[in-house]
Amino acid sequence: MRIKTRGRIAASSLTLALIAVLGGCDLGDDSGGDGPSANAPAPTERDRAKGGDAKQPAPSRGPGQESESFDPIELAGTGSETVEFEIPDSSPAIVRFTHDDSGLFQATSYTPDGEYITFLTSSFFSYEGVRPLNFQEPPAGKFEINAEGEWTATIEPLSEVPEATAETKGGGDAVLKIADLNATTVNVRHSGSSNFQVSAWSEEHRKYLINEIGMFDSRVDIPEDALFLEIVADGSWRLDFDN
């Protein structure tokens, strides 16, 4: 892989021992201080070797919240493997995948601790597409890649998401900014033969607008608070926005 950018004791003696132990403990309260959560994962052997507990990622934020800009995180490999990464401040982001082989390509996201988040993409052909990351909790920290050829994964900040225009054309998986369009409806056309999905992301949630198989040509409403569109497609698509 290439990465760019664990006999008896007298009652009086027992009492003294308990006082000594309790005297050295901070029992705290339920107000929620800066200490680690009771549900935080135990430190790994690697963390103990470094002399500290496992670093906990910041909670991911919705795509409408101010996010930290960062240099692209470039991952690459050949065949199947699991790769780790860290997005600064667990900011919402996008990931651009490419795969240059005609065989299987699948990508799945996990938390840094290995908790499953979501299935990102699957293709039996060469692939190039964009998928959202950290639009919802928990934050991602690993990709599981199943591939037969060379692949790349480039993680970028939301500032790199293209802005949709009144007439926007494309193909395959994509993420588009639509906040500044102030559109209320969009006519959507798709020429592919497989699953076709269009979702609108607001500051804190996602709404599915389209979930069909094959060709599609229809107008759909856009939520007033929509900021981004997420497209999952195997063919060409066109979006005609209307105010």
Image (spheres, rainbow, N blue to C red):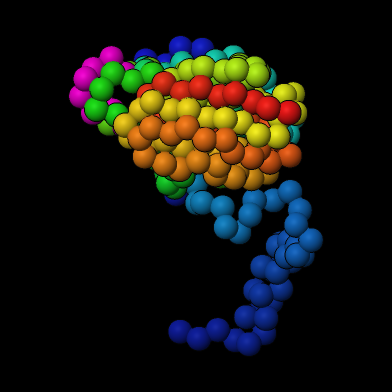
Quadrant containing the N terminus is: top left
Residue for point 42% across, 46% down: 116
Res 223 quadrant in image: top right
Q: Nearer the viewer, residue 52 or 1?
A: 1
Nearer to us in this view, 22 or 98: 98
Q: Residue at x 61, y 31 (%)?
A: 186
Q: Position of residue 27 (x, y in %)?
A: 73, 65
Residue 25: x and y in percent read 70, 62
The stretch of residues the image draws in magenta is: 99-108
Answer above or below: position of 37 versus 120.
Answer: below
Using the rendered view, name the quadrant where residue 106 is placed: top left
- Which residue is found at the position 57% from the left and 57% from the top? 39
Quadrant location of residue 191?
top left
Q: Is residue 96 left or right of residue 166?
A: left
Taking the magenta stretch, the answer to whether it contains residue 107 is: yes
Name the quarter where the C terminus is drawn.
Answer: top right
Residue 24 is situated, as x and y percent measured from the top left of the image, at 71, 62
> Residue 140 placed where, x, y %?
51, 37
Name the residue at 59% across, 23% down: 240
Between 116 and 42, the one lying in front of the other is 116
Q: Is residue 21 magenta?
A: no
